[in-house]
Image (cartoon, rainbow, N blue to C red):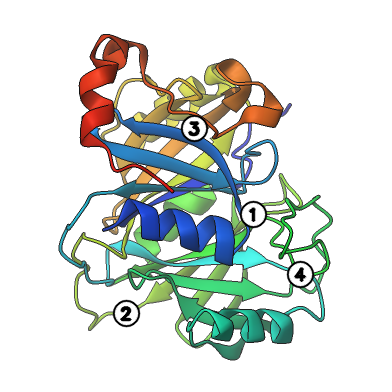
């Protein structure tokens, strides 16, 4: 595979209630719980991964459900929208489905593509969009969310920024994206390295209020590379650009590098390898609590602290 950024790998956000978060994403939106583990730095908190059947990069939304954390405020210096691709003709069905769960939504449009805008129980901004080019990825289906409406994975994410030029430079000069279109203060960047999950929108908000991390906000955006050899080449590129970046960190299911781009958004570069089946077979993904090996001796104590999911 080419030495390129392959669009989005995953997006990580913050929630205030594990059960409520689990119910919304698996039951209302119909995503698969791909992995149930804990925060590497705070093993008393879950780390949930939702995605398609395999947990394919480009479909993975993850959460730290810190119980009773205060609400955050979306604003500049963070990712402020997460957009999933859905099939043509599905928006009205989604609008009706969300209404059944008392979730209000609104149909809008960007760049000629209609989308349904709504928030999760913590106020995290989500969109379901019908892309001009149909998304052919195979969806995860549930009894209630069938293939005719099911999400295909990420379409894009939006970064809200006081000033976009330096961030755009990271996307184009380091990550290989290009400016596709502009609509008002929204600038759409795309990579041709992948067919899906390859769009980043930059929203220029010079007078915008800075975001505050908490429940209902995004923690970081992870970009995808094929393996850790390519990942380390990008590490050198980022260091050469004058930005600081972490050493490679083993996250059990992928390897990670983290850096803060000039606009303030925390970026991650994550690998495809080794994937989510390293500790569970495909058919059992997300069915039991998996712990980083350093926490396995404390499993009993950790399980006492974590909320029991129904």
Which residue is label 3 attached to?
A: 270
- Residue 9 visible: no
- Residue 260 visible: yes
Foreground: disc 2 or disc 4? 4
Q: Which mark is residue 149?
A: 4
Name the residue rendered at 37%, 39% in the picture. Answer: 47
In the rendered image, the vertical position of residue 27 relative to residue 47, given as above or below = below
**Residue 109 placement, left or right of 288:** right
Between discs 2 and 4, the one toward the N terminus: 4
Answer few, some or many: residues within 10 Å of disc 3's Cα (few below 14, many 20 plus, some between 14 and 19). Answer: many
Q: Which mark is residue 44?
A: none
Q: Which mark is residue 205?
A: 2
- Tag 3, which secondary structure? strand
Quadrant for residue 163, please give it. bottom left
**Residue 272 placement, left or right of 283:** left
Q: CA distance from mark 2 to mark 3?
A: 28 Å
Between discs 2 and 1, the one toward the N terminus: 1
Residue 309, given in percent of the width and then of the height, sits at: 40, 45
Q: Which mark is residue 198?
A: 1
Foreground: disc 2 or disc 3? 3
Q: CA distance from mark 3 to mark 4?
A: 29 Å
Residue 225, given in percent of the width and then of the height, sits at: 58, 32
In the rendered image, the vertical position of residue 235 relative to residue 171, given as above or below = above
Quadrant for residue 54, please give it. top right
Q: CA distance from mark 2 to mark 4?
A: 33 Å
- Tag 4, which secondary structure? loop
Between 115 and 89, the residue placed more toward the observer is 89
């Amino acid at each position: 595979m080419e030495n390129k950024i392959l669009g989005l790998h995953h997006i990580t956000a913050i929630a205030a209630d594990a059960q409520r978060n689990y119910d919304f994403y698996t039951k209302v939106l119909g995503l698969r719980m791909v992995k149930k583990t804990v925060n590497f730095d705070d093993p008393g908190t879950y780390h949930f991964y939702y995605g398609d059947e395999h947990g394919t990069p480009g479909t993975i939304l993850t959460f730290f459900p810190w119980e009773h954390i205060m609400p955050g405020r979306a604003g500049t210096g963070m990712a402020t929208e997460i957009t999933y691709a859905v099939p043509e003709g599905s928006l009205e069905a989604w609008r009706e489905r969300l209404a059944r769960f008392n979730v209000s939504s609104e149909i809008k449009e960007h760049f000629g593509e209609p989308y349904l805008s709504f928030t999760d129980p913590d106020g995290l901004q989500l969109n379901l969009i019908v892309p001009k080019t149909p998304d052919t990825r195979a969806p995860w289906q549930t009894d209630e969310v069938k293939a005719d409406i099911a999400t295909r994975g990420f379409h894009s994410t939006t970064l809200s920024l006081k000033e976009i030029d330096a961030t755009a430079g990271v996307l184009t000069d380091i990550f290989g994206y290009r400016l596709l279109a502009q609509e008002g203060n929204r600038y759409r960047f795309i990579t041709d390295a992948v067919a899906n999950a390859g769009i980043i929108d930059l929203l220029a908000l010079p007078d915008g209020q800075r975001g505050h991390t908490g429940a209902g906000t995004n923690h970081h955006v992870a970009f995808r590379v094929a393996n850790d050899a390519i990942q380390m080449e990008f590490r050198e590129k980022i260091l050469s650009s004058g930005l600081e970046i972490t050493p490679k960190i083993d996250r059990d299911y992928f390897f990670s590098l983290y850096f803060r781009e000039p606009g303030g958004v925390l970026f991650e570069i994550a690998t495809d390898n080794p994937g989510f089946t390293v500790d569970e077979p495909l058919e059992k993904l997300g069915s039991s609590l998996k712990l980083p090996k350093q926490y396995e001796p404390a499993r009993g104590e950790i399980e006492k602290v974590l909320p029991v999911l129904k």
